[in-house]
């Protein structure tokens, strides 16, 4: 095992513990992956993010075949689909966090952009958030539904499920997931209240200044 892989295993465990301790991942829900030069690491099936063992993380090849460790999450195909569409993605976080999962259950969302640009930080870390129609957990057809959106978006929201967020590093993916959850919380808190979201000119300014690909 390379020193880099060892370091990434430890970081997955540390971030998993942090997400679990703050209530962003309950029970054995949620999964984290990191891309390696020779495949990728994924949290195992039925694993609690708060009690991960770095030596037992699933290591898969580029085709999603298990190379070592415990059997991978049944949602491995979600991660593989996102990696295949986003060459720059180095990590993916999928949670069932309360507020973003609550939004995913709401009726009448804009399927192309289901959370408004309430803050600059949401725009900078997520951009536009498309909604993927409902599929049962583990349904391989969900992979194709994700591919159609992942080409143009770093994150998607699975209907009646939760978000899948990619990033250029594990830190970037985790921080973007947390920003999404906080924006979902704001969105729910502000329901039935007049809201002043960022307008097109303000979003264009963020795009220019920070080089965003939105």
Image (tube, grey):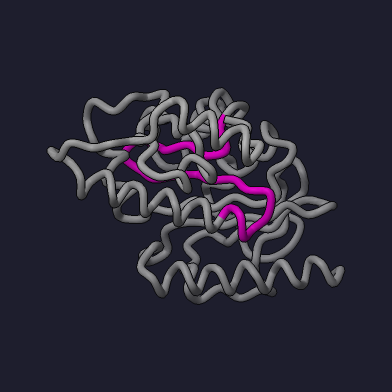
Q: Is residue 140 above or below residue 6?
A: above
Left or right, 152 with reference to 100: right
Query: For this rendering, which residue is in front, 72 or 5?
Result: 5
Residue at horizontal 51 percent and vertical 26 percent from the top: 145
Query: For this rendering, which residue is in front, 103 or 42?
Result: 103
Count of numbered circles on the image: 0
Q: Within the image, what quadrant is residue 195 found in?
A: top left
The residue furthest left is 192
Residue at horizontal 42 percent and vertical 23 percent from the top: 112
Residue 22 in picture, x, y percent from top left: 39, 71
Residue 115 in the magenta stretch? The answer is no
Q: Is residue 15 above or below residue 204?
A: below
Query: For this rendering, which residue is in front, 150 or 199?
Result: 199
Q: Please identify the quadrant where the N terminus is shown.
A: bottom right
Q: Is residue 212 above or below residue 51?
A: above
Magenta range is 153-173
Q: Please identify the quadrant where the C terminus is shown.
A: top right
Residue 37 in picture, x, y percent from top left: 84, 52
Residue at horizontal 59 percent and vertical 45 percent from the top: 166
Residue 188 in picture, x, y percent from top left: 23, 46
The residue furthest right is 2
Residue 11 in picture, x, y percent from top left: 65, 70
Residue at horizontal 74 percent and vertical 37 percent from the top: 87
Residue 161 in the magenta stretch? The answer is yes
Left or right, 38 with reference to 57: right
Q: Within the image, what quadrant is residue 107 found in?
A: top left
């Amino acid at each position: 095992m390379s020193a880099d892989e060892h370091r990434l295993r430890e970081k997955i465990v540390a971030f998993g513990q942090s997400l679990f301790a703050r209530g962003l991942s309950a029970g054995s829900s949620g999964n984290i992956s990191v891309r390696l030069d020779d495949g990728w690491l994924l949290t195992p099936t039925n694993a609690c993010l708060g009690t991960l063992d770095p030596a037992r993380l699933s290591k898969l090849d580029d085709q999603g075949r298990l190379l070592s460790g415990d059997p991978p999450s049944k949602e491995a195909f979600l991660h593989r689909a996102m990696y295949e569409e986003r060459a720059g993605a180095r990590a993916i976080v999928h949670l069932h966090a309360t507020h973003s999962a609550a939004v995913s259950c709401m009726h009448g969302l804009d399927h192309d952009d289901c959370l408004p640009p309430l803050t600059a930080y949401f725009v900078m870390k997520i951009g536009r958030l498309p909604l993927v129609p409902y599929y049962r957990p583990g349904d391989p057809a969900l992979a194709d539904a994700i591919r159609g959106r992942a080409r143009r978006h770093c994150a998607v929201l699975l209907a009646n499920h939760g978000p899948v967020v990619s990033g250029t590093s594990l830190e970037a993916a985790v921080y973007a997931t947390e920003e999404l959850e906080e924006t979902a919380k704001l969105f729910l808190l502000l329901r039935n209240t007049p809201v002043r979201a960022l307008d097109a000119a303000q979003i264009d300014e963020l795009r220019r200044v920070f080089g965003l690909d939105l």
